[in-house]
Image (cartoon, rainbow, N blue to C red):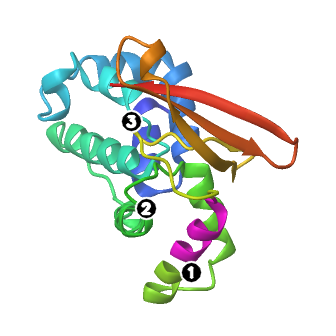
């Protein structure tokens, strides 16, 4: 398959975001083709070209898939190349935004996992089931984390760890810093990391 056909397959939905991402990383022809394009606002405003934008974002996240398909649609339209666009990614993104709590950044694999558990549901019933699944999976002892930066709840094999708590370690740091503590129940081990402002 040539580079244009790969892009068209991704837009049509017959090539998954995972497979398209592999093409971006390992297919020199796609890199060359997309590197030539530097006039697709707003995507190429900050990045030198379309290729650099696409490898910088995470197309495995619903927002990344949405933006990548928008950029590639504009790319093909600009070249007068006919293509079909499957809109499932837009519906998926809208659902993702409805169910993701503000204190989390859900990963695509986790979102797909819970979507597959509830594939027999649609509409409000699906939305409600996903919200309950997230509430059940993301456990905390007393309070949920108060993030200083972007939410970064760790998972192992798509299973969220249990949030134990956070410590203010600003006194031993240069900035306002919290230490976050999570429990991996399966391994009976703890994971910690810091965030600073």
Q: Is residue 106 visible?
A: yes
Q: Position of residue 193 (x, y in %)?
A: 58, 27
Residue 138, placed above or below residue 5: below
Q: Position of residue 96 (x, y in %)?
A: 42, 63
Quadrant of the rendered image containing residue 116: bottom right
Say which residue appears at 20% left-offset and 33% top-offset: 43
Give the label on residue 4, or none: 3
Q: CA distance from mark 3 to mark 2?
A: 34 Å
Q: Main secondary structure of the magenta part?
A: helix
Quadrant of the rendered image containing residue 42: top left
Q: Residues within 10 Å of mark 1 (few under 14, many from 20)?
A: some
Q: Mark 2 sits on what residue?
A: 100
Mark sitting earlier along the chain (3/2): 3
Disc 3 vs disc 2: which is toward the camera? 2
Q: Look at the numbered discs 3 and 2 and tell me whether their residues touch, using CB distance below 8 Å.
A: no
**Region in magenta:** 130-139
Residue 169, placed above or below residue 66: above
Q: Mark 1 sits on what residue?
A: 129
Quadrant of the rendered image containing residue 40: top left
Judging depth in this view, the residue of 1 and 24 nearest the camera is: 24
């Amino acid at each position: 398959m040539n580079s244009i056909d790969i892009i068209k397959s991704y837009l049509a939905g017959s090539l998954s975001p995972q497979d398209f991402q592999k093409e971006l990383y390992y297919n020199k022809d796609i890199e060359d083709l997309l590197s030539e394009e530097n006039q697709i606002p707003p995507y190429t405003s900050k990045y030198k070209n379309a290729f650099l934008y696409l490898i910088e974002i995470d197309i495995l996240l619903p927002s990344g898939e949405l933006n990548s398909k928008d950029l590639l649609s504009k790319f093909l339209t600009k070249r007068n190349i006919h293509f079909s666009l499957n809109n499932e990614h837009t519906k998926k993104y809208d659902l993702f935004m409805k169910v993701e709590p503000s204190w989390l950044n859900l990963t695509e694999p986790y979102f797909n996992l819970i979507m597959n558990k509830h594939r027999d549901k649609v509409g409000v019933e699906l939305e409600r089931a996903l919200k309950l699944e997230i509430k059940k999976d993301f456990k905390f002892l007393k309070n949920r984390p108060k993030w200083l930066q972007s939410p970064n709840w760790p998972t192992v094999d798509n299973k969220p760890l249990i949030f134990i708590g956070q410590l203010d370690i600003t006194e031993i740091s240069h900035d306002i810093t919290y230490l976050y503590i999570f429990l991996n129940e399966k391994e009976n081990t703890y994971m910690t990391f810091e965030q600073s402002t």
